[in-house]
């Protein structure tokens, strides 16, 4: 009997995928470990490997087919020496099983958070229809779920980043001086400091490092910071694991590597799965302040705006300082206002006194 090759669960939260490309053709021999196909998930394009030897007998889902549920047969593998004539019977069984499950699949689709298209009006301007990517569909579903189920509230604070910018200049200058004519060991960004400050603030205020479940509250024992990265396919959040235990140089190198993989669509599930807290920075686009939607099932997301010179009052006199505005979006089911305020106070303390990041 032919071996069914199923759409695999390539990450813990994967429910469906899209066949991006078949790397083996029908009739081609297959060995264990051979890459059969590339599957596009909401986060990345990953490879499906063969687990047994044989011949790729029939492809059931061609390249470009999307919305394939995990566990659905996508191809049939003939075992070594097996007669290709058995394929017809195997396909008939799969079709019959699919018909039996059609009512269940229809019920699941009715529960979708995204309403079906209502069609276009003769009053709309001309437009080109672009099919939704798997990533865009997932973003839409998760953000709709978050805004519908998590009661958001927002806390905003401003802080002086001049000490942080000075520390960054000094550290980058030292790295360049140590390297001489070679490549410096690191080049720190403002975001690297923010990741470490956010992580250390969570360690100081662990009640913000939580997520809500209907029956329990999850208090995370590790500080894993997810960082929003803009890619051609949409937003993705690779994770810096145990960020509170890492130095600036290590965070910087890891973040550059993850961002590069994200933009190339090469993130592995372990690169983006999980995360207990998210940072989103739009300062590089000149955005002064914004309130991000919480990344479920997390309870908090920190939004960072541009660092810009502003007039401030110091010792009863006007002065110029480089200021930044950040907003903490909070799930009120899991984190109360006072806890969120304590978290922002701790975060601000680390940002305005960057030497404490090394303590």
Image: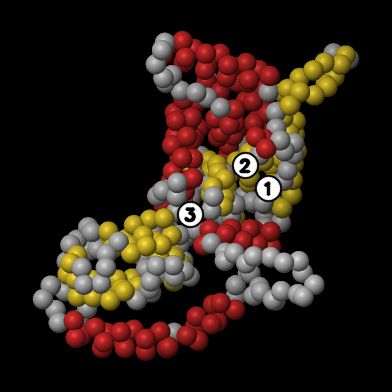
Q: Mark 2 = which residue?
A: 280
Image coordinates of residue 54 in percent, x first then y, are 17, 70
The residue sitting at 16% across, 74% down in the picture is: 79
Question: Is residue 177 rendered to the left or right of residue 331?
Answer: left
- Residue lying farthest to the left in this orientation: 81
Q: Nearer the viewer, mark 2 or mark 3?
A: 3
Say what secondary structure mark 1 lies in. loop
**In whole angstroms, how far apart are the C-alphas of marks 2 and 3?**
17 Å
The residue sitting at 47% across, 69% down in the picture is: 66
**In whole angstroms, how far apart are the C-alphas of marks 3 and 1?**
19 Å
Q: Mark 3 = which residue?
A: 43
The residue sitting at 25% across, 72% down in the picture is: 26
- In this orientation, which residue lies closer to the viewer: 215 or 120? 120
Q: Mark 1 = which residue?
A: 292
| Residue 178, above or below 85 | above
If you read the primary sequence from the N terminus, does the residue marked by circle 1 or circle 2 appear first? 2
């Amino acid at each position: 009997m032919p071996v069914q090759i199923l759409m695999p669960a390539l990450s813990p939260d994967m429910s469906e995928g899209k066949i991006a490309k078949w790397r083996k053709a029908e009739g081609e021999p297959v060995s264990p470990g051979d890459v059969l196909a590339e599957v596009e998930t909401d986060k990345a394009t990953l490879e499906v490997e063969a687990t047994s030897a044989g011949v790729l007998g029939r492809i059931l889902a061609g390249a470009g087919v999307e919305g394939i549920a995990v566990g659905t047969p996508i191809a049939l593998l003939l075992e070594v020496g097996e007669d290709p004539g058995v394929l017809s019977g195997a396909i008939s069984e799969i079709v019959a099983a699919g018909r039996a499950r059609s009512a269940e699949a229809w019920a699941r689709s009715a529960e979708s958070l995204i309403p079906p298209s209502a069609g276009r009006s003769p009053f709309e301007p001309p437009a080109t229809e672009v099919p939704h990517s798997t990533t865009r569909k997932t973003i839409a579903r998760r953000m709709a779920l978050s805004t519908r189920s998590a009661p958001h509230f927002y806390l905003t604070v401003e802080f002086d980043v001049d000490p942080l910018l000075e520390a960054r200049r000094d550290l980058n200058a030292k790295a360049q001086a140590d390297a001489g004519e070679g490549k410096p060991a690191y080049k720190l960004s403002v975001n690297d400091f923010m990741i470490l400050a956010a992580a250390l603030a969570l360690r100081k205020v662990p009640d913000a490092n939580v997520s809500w479940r209907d029956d329990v509250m999850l208090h995370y024992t590790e500080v894993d910071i997810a960082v929003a990265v803009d890619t051609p396919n949409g937003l993705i959040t690779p994770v810096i694991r145990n960020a509170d235990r890492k130095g600036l140089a290590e965070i910087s190198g890891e973040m550059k590597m993850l961002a590069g993989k994200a933009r190339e669509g090469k993130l592995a599930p372990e690169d983006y799965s999980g995360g207990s807290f998210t940072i989103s920075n739009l300062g590089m686009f000149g955005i002064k302040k914004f309130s991000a939607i919480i990344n479920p099932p997390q309870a908090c997301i920190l939004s960072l705006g541009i660092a810009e010179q502003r007039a401030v009052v110091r010792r009863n006199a006007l002065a110029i300082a480089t200021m930044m505005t950040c907003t903490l979006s909070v799930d009120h089911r899991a984190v109360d206002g006072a806890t969120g305020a304590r978290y922002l106070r701790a975060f601000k303390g680390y940002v305005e006194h960057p030497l404490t990041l090394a303590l």
